[in-house]
Image: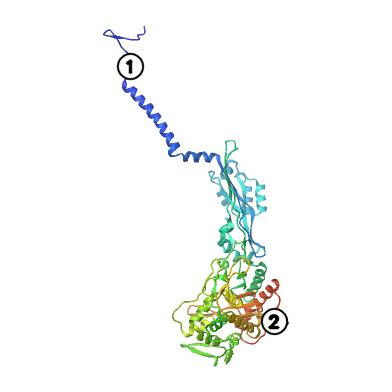
Amino acid sequence: MAITRTKRNGKKLKPHLGNGRFYTALALLGLVFSSLVARAAYIQVIDPERLIVEGDRRSLRAATTTVQRGSIMDRNGRELAISVPVETVWADPQQVHEGNGLANRERWLALAEVFRVDVNSLLSKVENPKRRFVYLERKVTPAVAEFVRQLNIPGIHLKTESRRFYPGGEISAHVVGFTDIDGVGIEGLEAIYDATLTGTPGERVYRKDAQGRVVEEISVTAAQQPKQLTLSIDQRLQSLAYAELKKAVRYHQATSGSAVILDIKTGEILAMVNSPSYNPNNRADLQPHRLRNRAITDAYEPGSTMKPLAVIAGLEAGAIKATDVIDTSPGWMRLGGRRVSDPQNRGELTISQVLETSSNMGSAKIALAAGIDQVMSTYAALGLGNDTGSALLGESFGVLQARRRWSDFEVATLSFGYGLSVTTLQLAQAYAIIGNSGVRVPLTIQRREGQPQGQQVISAANAQAVLSMLENTVIEGGAKRARVRGYRIAGKTGTSRKAVAGGYGDEYVTLFAGIAPVSEPRLAVVVTINEPSGDDYYGGDVAAPVFAEIVGDALRLMNITPDNLADTQLRVAGFGGTND
């Protein structure tokens, strides 16, 4: 019999639970509910990003549109640096292991052979099955890419990248430079204008569902195409200058050489070459010293190529006139216990003859008469001791000291190119100013449209007077081997000993700086040959013939009208006067 209720003292009793258990259960329910609300609030309000990120990782996708690096062209549209599509071999180690890709070792041996690497080092790249991406070989040839496809190894893939190619090879290597394997410029103009040439890839962001269908277009960013860089360089002039310079460096067994061609009117660098050079398309065995653009990085004492500048200083100071005569007897003099001399006593010389005979006595007396302040200000006005405006990577300013006290001997040596140093490009700029009637135009490596506004740094009359003297130096003096048939040429040779610890050694730098054609100057050209071997080490014997070959071909290529049709004589090797 079930008892449903009991009586006590004749009263009905109501069933009940313990009050403690009731409130405990209620509290627990409230706590659980509060926890759920707090967690939801935390996820939705305080820290919603994590779940959003997790969701986006599973549904969001991004597709990029690659852009090729901008091309570098010469002034006539010839390609000096271009990007071409190539294949890169990469592996997904997880797929390699899941697809049993390591089972056939013969395929890996074939892959290692075509990559020219050890097979064990190749296999070590895919030994970790947790990795999802590893490069096997970057930017392979089309033939190698096709071979990889035919091997058909599980987990091995190809992707398209771009590779920089330099059609000019070693001819333009020092100017153009090169990029690293990731397409970042690290030398030359490739480094200077890296941001301009790179561009920005495009990107499309979209959302996919579990079946891989596109359900939402998030954003589309258009690609920003890179700009093309057009240089002032004329690849035709660059090629002929490099060929002649390389031949001369090899013939004279010189350490190195440089040559620069400037457009006198516009300040454009039409050619800049160095030997030895390197091939930017194959840098496997590249020697670091070959990377140096010596035309702008290496500064030398310029020797007698400074004598025309000393004459300009004297003319600008009013210390001499173009028609003056200077007595150089007895062919030597002492200045502060030091000796300045000529090879022989040349007696009285006109200012033009000072340059024709390359007289140290004559230039020293001119510099002393002008004064150190005028000499230094003239040199500085002609661009020495400063940048040329070309903004090229690694350009040296040379050495033009700013001192309060100078001895007479130091002033004298400045006049014939010792006690200062200049680069090949700086010297070319100085002679371009002379050819441009004393107007200095900042140099540029980019093509210029029209003629820029220049600055008159020396008087036009004095510049013209020195230009005529330099023409006489080629006709009558020690620069006869710089003559070009059919054209009037002005220029000056230079030979300087290289400084060593404690004085000067037995190595020489030979130079020739010139202007052509004299009737209407268009080109300023400087040739520098560093440390020629053998008995021929004077500028007139080593650098002047290279100048003549370069300028002759350049004038004809540029269709510049001959201004000396009466000259039908061929250049001759023998001549009188100094070789300096």
Q: Residue at x 32, y 13 (%)?
A: 14
Image quarter of the N terminus: top left
Q: Can you give x and y, in whole percent of width and height, for residue 23 in the image? A: 33, 24
Give how far across and how far down residue 84 sits, in percent: 64, 55
Residue 218: give its label: none
Q: Residue at x 38, y 26 (%)?
A: 29
User: Mark 1: which amino acid?
Assistant: His
Residue 16 is tagged as 1
At mark 1, the secondary structure is loop
| Separation (CA) of disc 2 from disc 1 | 132 Å
Specify the farthest residue to the top. Answer: 1
Mark 2 crowdedness (10 Å alpha carbons): few <14, some 14-19, many ≥20: some
Residue 346 seen in render: no
SS class of the residue under badge 2? loop
Residues under numbered marks 2 and 1 in contact, where contact means CB atoms less than 8 Å apart: no
Question: Which labelled disc corresponds to residue 571?
Answer: 2
Closest to the observer: 459 or 336? 459
Q: Earlier in the sequence, mark 2 or mark 1?
A: 1
Residue 124 appears anywhere in the view = yes
Report the quarter where the C terminus lies: bottom right
- Image quadrant in which you'd find residue 433: bottom right
User: Does residue 342 lie above or below 292 as drawn?
Assistant: below
Q: Residue furthest left?
A: 9
The crowd level at tag 1 (other Cα within 10 Å; few <14, some 14-19, many 20+) is: few
Residue 406 lies, in percent from the top left, at 46, 82
Which percent across, then down, holds residue 66?
Answer: 60, 51
Number of numbered labels in the structure image: 2
Nearer-the-camera pick, 143 or 239: 239
Looking at numbered disc 2 in the image, what kind of residue is underneath it?
Answer: Arg
Q: How is the image coloured?
A: rainbow
